Image: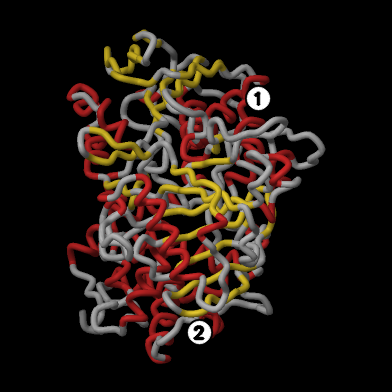
Amino acid sequence: MSDKPLTVTRRTALRAGLAAGAALAVTAPATAATPGPRSPLLRSGGRTVAIFGGGMAGLSAAHELAERGYQVTVYEPAYLGGKARSLGVPGTGGPGRQDLPGEHGFRFFPGCYRNVPDTMSRIPFPGNPNGVLDNLVRVEGTVAGFENSAPIFLPVELGGLTQLTPQVLQSTLVGAFGFVPELPAHELAFFAKQMTMWFTSSTERRFGQWEYVTWEQIMRAEGKSAAYRRYLVNALTRITVAAKPQTSSARTIGTIGEALVLAGSGLVPEFSGGVDRILNRPTNAAWIDPWVTHLRGLGVRFVLGQGARALHLAGGRIASVTVSGAAATTTVTADHYVCAMPVDRVVDLLSPAILDADPRLAGMRELVTDWMVGIQYFLRRPSDIPEGHIAALGSPWAITALRQAPMWVGDFAATYGDGSVVECLSVDISDWDTPGILYGRTAKDCGVAEIATEVWAQLKGWLNTGTGWLRDEDIHSWHLDPGITWSGGGIHNATPLLVNTVGSYDHRPDARCAIPNLYFGGDHVRSHIDLATMEGANESGRAAANAILDAADDPAPRATCFPLVDLPAFAAAKALDADRFRAGLPHLLDL
């Protein structure tokens, strides 16, 4: 691609007319306590709620509704907590010790999260005045690893800023990414200029233009150096959101990038938690188990081993839902029904009758999922890697990791395993489709032992130059997320996540639909953060709860859906860009 402007066509401008209304909903202030007006056709009284899916969205919806006195039952076929859960590795605990801590992937709580921390603050935890929220630990730095080069330790927060104007932003980004090796100075300046263009783009342009181009296009990757393409365009996107810059919506990547920069600036009071936080013990112990206990105390009923198999429509409403599991198949009836399942499972429930009642739901079949799955290495010796997250930048499988023992409460060896394991290195694999360095195959083409060996080889190749941090003899054992299975000659993932491809916002559902007692939650539902995250799923659960309150004409205060934050310093530039977009002109910086 050349460096000519990304043209705003008449078709693109017309899209904005439809998108702007949706954008206003997405960027609206936090939900007020007073319910808004509702169409009589979208009312559905009663206070019994069936929630299908016990992940982040389902538990969040249950929490908000139970606090308001609704009778809630959650049906979960596998694990409460969904992709956020942790689990013990069976049979690894010695006398008086717990099993070694396995998980889907390590948890990361950016300071731009607001919905999740609010929920956490309302979950009691012994000795914590702010509930499980006090189990978050602030991370100060990260290790950036490069192939066959010495890794470097970097602060995760920008520091020293007293303001953030477009000019300050541009110079700050140049300073922040100056560590990238072999990156031409003029390309780093260009990257900072493109990011500033995003920060000063209007809502109309974000939804009317940037939604329909890829992140690779907005970053003008074609023709740039290998370092620019490998690190600034590809690696930062893959390790942050497990998304491919060649296919992902520029609006989605820009949204989370902006939020992380603002969280790291220290200038946004609403993002006061810092750019990076982790839990101080396994996720279930720190959060999910106390949450489920609290919800049970509020009257929530959990039915495990049962998942939704069919929605039955009668008289324009959901009359019942068939649920089944290993034990039995039953019929569930309630006043309200919330589908809080992954999108690949929701689409199986969209019968012709459902789609006739709300044709817009067919868009969910166009959504794309990808894989981001964790593996843990249990070590007999501390690795001595600095505390914080680890990013193997440019690694084929987009490897990120976290040393968990140093930031967890208690003595790791005395708490977990057989007493010989002193550390858990938790690793996320974000690219399952690129050949590795050891076998020359993608992760999807490897067996379980080959995945473990390949990931370890990539970690050593990106972290061991000049350090000797990782030694083969220190490995006690490893544990791959059990959602990855092999059968029928192929590999399967039970927990894919949504990837926001170009134009996919048009296909994503809202929490409510045209069927008056059917609602949706999950990382595929429209949200402020616009990304497959715990934050987006939590917000979708809140939105589903609010839709139920509206449908029931309930005067109770609505759950707050926290928006992202705009800095006033960028308001004038965004207003100018809105005028230019409506006139069919490119952004001033789109040169």
Q: Residue at x 63, y 30 (%)?
A: 289
Relative horizontal placement of residue 65, taking residue 253 as reference (left or right): right
**x and y percent of residue 206 in the render?**
36, 63
Q: Residue at x 22, y 60 (%)?
A: 14
Closer to the camera in the image, 471 or 500:
471
Place residue 399 in its image quadrant. Answer: bottom left
Q: Residue at x 28, y 49 (%)?
A: 444
Read off the residue under disc 1.
293
Closer to the camera in the image, 316 or 136:
136
Read off the residue under disc 2.
178
Vertical placement of 348 versus 335: above or below? below
Which mark is first along the chain, 2 or 1?
A: 2
Closer to the camera in the image, 216 or 69:
216
Vertical placement of 165 versus 522: above or below? below
Relative horizontal placement of residue 449, taking residue 417 as reference (left or right): left
**x and y percent of residue 277 in the render?**
63, 56
**x and y percent of residue 327 in the render?**
39, 10
For the residues labelled 1 and 2, the Cα–Cα distance comes to: 47 Å
SS at circle 1: helix
Residue 203 appears anywhere in the view? yes
Vertical placement of 8 versus 238: above or below? below
Relative horizontal placement of residue 542, taking residue 24 as reference (left or right): right
Residue 36 appears anywhere in the view? no
SS at circle 2: loop
